[in-house]
Image: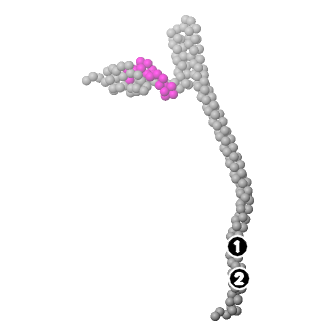
Amino acid sequence: MQDPNQASQNPTDQPAEQAAQGGAQQPAQRGPELDLQAAAAAADTAPENGIDSMPSLEEALRQAELKAAEHHDAWLRAKAETENLRRRAQDDIAKASKFAAEKFATAMLPVKDSLEAALATENQTVEKMREGVELTLRQLISAFEGAKLAEENPLGQKFDPNKHQAISMVEADAEPNTVVTVLQKGYLLSERVIRPAMVMVSKGKAQ
């Protein structure tokens, strides 16, 4: 049989043991509370970090705006300079063309003066007339040289279709395609043909 003393001790001992066990388990149940406190602390510090980062973003935006303004100003200056260069180039071209015409016209004035003087002279001899014409021709040649207008007289040269215009081909002692007669001289302006020379070309003797 069970000892009455032991039976009487069991009901009282069990609550004490459960209380002891419950007291031992209380520290383990505090873990979620600590996690909640850590999360709350992190939530409290998050806005502060966000506020701290805002000035750096604003500064970056301000720097970007300054850079954009500098690039825009540089582009405007470059555009204005390009426009000024274009205008100056156009003015230089117009002045060069005008100056070239003025220079040639100035060189032609003595030629006109000589012709008028020759016509104004009465009872002049043939020799005097010839001297006046030769002087006028020299003045004209000098004016042509000043304007870079060169004479093309290809007598005895090989026929060049770029500079010569063949009127006919004739039998001659010269090699074929040789200019044997110049009917009209040609002229070149700065190596550009403004009038081809009119010529007759040899075709060789018939066998």
Q: Dot 2, how many residues are within 10 Å of its Cα: few (below 14), some (14-19), or many (20+)?
A: few
Q: Quadrant of residue 6?
A: bottom right
Q: Magenta stretch mostly in which secondary structure? A: strand
Residue 48's x, y, as percent?
74, 59
**Residue drawn 48% across the image and 23% down it:** 194
Q: Which numbered disc, 1 or 2, marks the residue that appears first in the sequence?
A: 2
Q: Which residue is mark 2?
A: 15
**Residue drawn 56% across the image and 6% down it:** 122
Q: Amino acid at mark 2?
A: Pro
Residue placed furthest toward the left: 207
Q: Report the front residue among 22 and 194.
A: 22
Task: Give the CA distance from mark 1 to mark 2.
Answer: 23 Å
Which stretch is magenta? 179-200
Residue 171's x, y, as percent?
32, 21
Q: Quadrant of residue 25?
A: bottom right
Secondary structure at badge 1 equals loop
Q: Quadrant of residue 72?
A: top right
Residue 152's x, y, as percent?
46, 24
Q: Amino acid at mark 1?
A: Arg
Of the 4 image quadrants, the one containing the C terminus is top left
Count of numbered labels shown in the rendering: 2
Q: Which residue is mark 1?
A: 30
Secondary structure at badge 2 equals helix
Q: Report the front residue among 85 and 150.
A: 85
